[in-house]
Image (cartoon, rainbow, N blue to C red):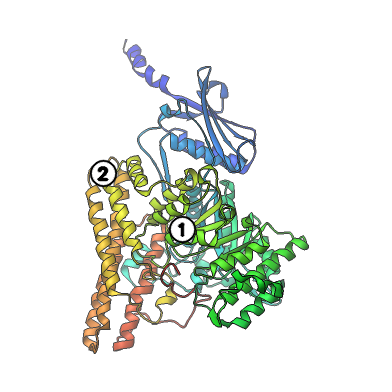
């Protein structure tokens, strides 16, 4: 009797168990990846179990290519036949099938984000009832542009962590990634009797671990902050170079395995009509990275601070590439002034790249498709794009027309005035701005404005949008918005914040939405290089900022944190609670950072004594130390370690340098001779320039 009762008690549980199988005829790596992901997220979750026996399976999941779908589209089709649940996951190409997989998983209850995923309670099997969906993404190719140039980005990650980052991108249904390399960072160039090695991380600025207990506790390198696997060989440049290229090769392979399109970007930095060095560089890069789908040759960043040239020099550069007829084009000649910065060099670099592309095509050099990139953030971006467009189709041109997502949204209609150009050009925007790296940011408003103004956006209206970012955890919410908006079209930010909060189980979605709106306002109030992550920017001492602007920013950031505090209690699960706690932590750290800058402005008082100067410097350093301690309370990813050490070696050290110059107090660690291999562009100015 007891045995019979035991069996009766467990019969419902056994009956509720669901076996699933996966069927495909494709051997494509992205399909194999999709199978592994389905098993990873469904097998042994609740009562789901994978079986290779299709006859006994309750769910039949089919992965297949559907050539009738539009480019980059994907679909989920659920139906019941003979009491079995059929789930067809299809893509326009095999590489699009992972997007269908993650669409299914999100429908079943998963939420995928930059730094991981969340499943609220159980798999929602009921969601499959009568569910079918064809998704033609608002943007065909959606993803990230990784500059891999600062300590807080993935260029410091271990290889397993970097691969997980790539998988998280794919899970968010991003299907494009561009890797940019500044000279000496991610590719080797062999010349006649020398080799320009890779591995000059962070522009060649070493981040040796300082003798500071907090940094040593939280930064997991022994001597020099870099990719952990490379650190033992850091001082062996050929070996470091070899391991650097291998690391990025493996990251690219993971992106390809996940169905992503991979683009490599570099700067020829050449305005000469002699194109042979660039052709040789292209071929060497492709031999090192055969995984790439396209190579972009992009102009150096320009916005009004570069070399000055005369009008005659600018016209001469144009004529050298395009003949004197080009000087009849008023769009190109009207910006020319008697003496000005940048324009001559921008025109020359564009001419050089156009000539390289033409030669590569004419001589049938074995290369992937080539693209021209324009990184120009001031009024010259209009004639620069016009010049490129005269000789290339829009789909072969990439444009970064401003700093920050809001300024990109404002500049895109000016630069890409033709709607077909806007639909087909590769557009680079921002999740965050690297000039304000140590502050919590929110770039959603600009992303919304960019996407909401695009023609035909609801029917696959754009070709490619990729977003710059460096930090991962700090951009969790913005990245989720960007991923969804490039698939489904722009959603009003306030509505997104509410829906996001509801999905995660945050206690008060309305209050959460208000807090994120205030954060957006605080971040957007004043754009500057207040938190620029390049060590060289701080090398000669502290960089002061307007006291009025700092106090306005602090007031607004404090208001955002105050409203967010109302979401601290009553959250439905640990994931929601951690989301609120992390955002609160970063807002707290931001406020302390701003307080340090406000205090530092007291150093500019007239006729200040050395004693008073030292006292204020010590107070500023104490505030910065508190900022570092608060920041270190939550370190969810490797990039947080990079932010911590970079902040210590940049603005914190800059205060000590200013003190040493003014009062003679010795530095706790001497400044080494200038060591950077390369340098980013000079500080930005107003209006995104």
Quadrant where the C terminus lies? Answer: bottom left
Q: Is residue 323 above or below residue 494?
A: below
Quadrant where the N terminus lies? Answer: top left
Q: Earlier in the sequence, mark 2 or mark 1?
A: 1
User: Visible in this render: residue 197?
Assistant: no
Residue 530 position within the rendered picture, expressed as x and y whole percent measured from the top left? 36, 70
Assess disc 1: are there few (<14), some (14-19) or many (≥20) residues with their C-alpha within 10 Å of its C-alpha.
many
Q: Is residue 495 above or below residue 416?
A: above
Q: Nearer the viewer, mark 2 or mark 1?
A: 1
Residue sticking out furthest to the right? 363
Horizontally, residue 447 falls left or right of residue 542, namely right
Disc 1 target residue? 409
Horizontally, residue 128 falls left or right of residue 629, namely right
Disc 2 target residue? 508
Residue 223 location, quadrant:
bottom left
Residue 377 position within the rendered picture, expressed as x and y whole percent measured from the top left? 50, 68
Question: For the residue labelled by badge 1, is the local secondary structure a helix, a strand or a loop?
Answer: helix
Residue 383 position within the rendered picture, expressed as x and y whole percent measured from the top left? 58, 68
């Amino acid at each position: 009797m007891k045995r019979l009762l035991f069996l009766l008690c467990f019969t419902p549980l056994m009956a509720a168990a669901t076996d699933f199988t996966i069927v495909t005829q494709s051997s494509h790596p992205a399909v194999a990846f999709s199978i592994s992901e389905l098993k990873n997220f469904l097998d042994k979750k609740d009562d789901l179990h994978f079986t290779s026996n299709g006859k006994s399976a309750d769910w039949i999941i089919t992965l297949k290519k559907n050539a009738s779908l539009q480019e980059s589209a994907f679909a989920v089709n659920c139906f019941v036949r003979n009491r079995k649940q059929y789930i067809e996951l299809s893509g326009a190409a095999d590489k699009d099938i992972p997007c269908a997989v993650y669409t299914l998983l999100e429908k079943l209850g998963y939420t995928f984000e930059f730094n991981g995923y969340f499943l609220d309670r159980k798999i929602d099997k009921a969601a499959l009832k009568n569910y079918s969906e064809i998704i033609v993404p608002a943007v065909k190719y959606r993803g990230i542009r990784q500059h891999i140039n600062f300590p807080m980005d993935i260029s410091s990650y271990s290889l397993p962590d970097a691969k997980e980052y790539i998988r998280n991108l794919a899970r968010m249904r991003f299907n494009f990634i561009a890797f940019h390399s500044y000279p000496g960072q991610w590719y080797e160039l062999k010349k006649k009797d020398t080799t320009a090695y890779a591995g000059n991380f962070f522009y060649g600025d070493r981040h040796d671990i300082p003798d500071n207990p907090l940094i040593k506790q939280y930064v997991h390198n022994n001597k020099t902050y870099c990719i952990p696997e490379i650190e033992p060989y850091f001082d062996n440049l050929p070996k470091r170079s070899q391991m650097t290229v291998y690391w990025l090769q493996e990251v690219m392979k993971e992106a390809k395995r996940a169905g992503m399109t991979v683009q490599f970007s570099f700067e020829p930095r050449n305005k000469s009509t002699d194109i042979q060095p660039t052709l040789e560089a292209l071929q060497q890069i492709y031999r090192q990275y055969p995984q790439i789908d396209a190579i972009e040759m992009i102009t150096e960043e320009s916005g009004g601070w570069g070399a000055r040239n005369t009008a005659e020099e600018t016209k001469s550069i144009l004529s050298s590439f395009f003949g004197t007829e080009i000087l009849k084009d008023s769009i190109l000649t009207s910006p020319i002034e008697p003496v000005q910065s940048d324009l001559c060099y921008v025109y020359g670099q564009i001419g050089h790249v156009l000539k390289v592309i033409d030669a590569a095509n004419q001589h049938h050099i074995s290369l992937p498709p080539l693209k021209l990139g324009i990184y120009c953030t001031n009024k010259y971006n209009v004639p620069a794009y016009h010049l490129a467009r005269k000789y290339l189709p829009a789909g072969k041109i990439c444009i970064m027309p401003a700093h920050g997502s809001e300024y990109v949204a404002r500049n895109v209609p000016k630069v890409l005035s033709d709607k077909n150009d806007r639909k087909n050009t590769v557009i680079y925007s921002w999740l965050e701005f690297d000039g304000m790296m140590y502050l919590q940011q929110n770039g959603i408003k600009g992303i919304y404005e960019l996407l909401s103004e695009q023609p035909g956006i609801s029917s696959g209206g754009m070709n490619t949008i990729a977003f710059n970012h460096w930090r991962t955890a700090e951009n969790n919410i913005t990245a989720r918005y960007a991923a969804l908006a490039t698939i489904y079209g722009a959603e009003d930010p306030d509505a997104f914040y509410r829906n996001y909060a509801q999905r995660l189980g945050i206690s008060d979605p309305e209050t959460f939405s208000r807090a994120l709106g205030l954060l957006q306002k605080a971040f957007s109030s004043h754009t500057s290089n207040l938190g620029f992550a390049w060590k060289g920017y701080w090398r000669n001492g502290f960089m002061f900022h307007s006291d009025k602007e700092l106090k306005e920013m602090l007031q607004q950031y404090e208001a955002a944190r105050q409203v967010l505090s109302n979401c601290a209690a009553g959250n439905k699960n640990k994931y929601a609670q951690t989301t609120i706690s992390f955002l609160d932590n970063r807002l707290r750290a931001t406020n302390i950072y701003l307080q340090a800058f406000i205090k530092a402005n007291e150093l500019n008082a007239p006729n200040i004594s050395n004693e008073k100067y030292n006292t204020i410097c010590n107070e500023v350093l104490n505030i910065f130390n508190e900022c570092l301690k608060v920041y270190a309370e939550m370190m969810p990813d490797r990039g947080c370690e990079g932010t911590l050490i970079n902040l210590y070696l940049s603005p914190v050290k800059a205060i000590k340098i200013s003190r040493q110059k003014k009062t003679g107090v010795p530095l706790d660690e001497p400044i080494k001779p200038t060591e950077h291999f390369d340098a980013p562009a000079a500080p930005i100015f107003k209006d995104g320039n």
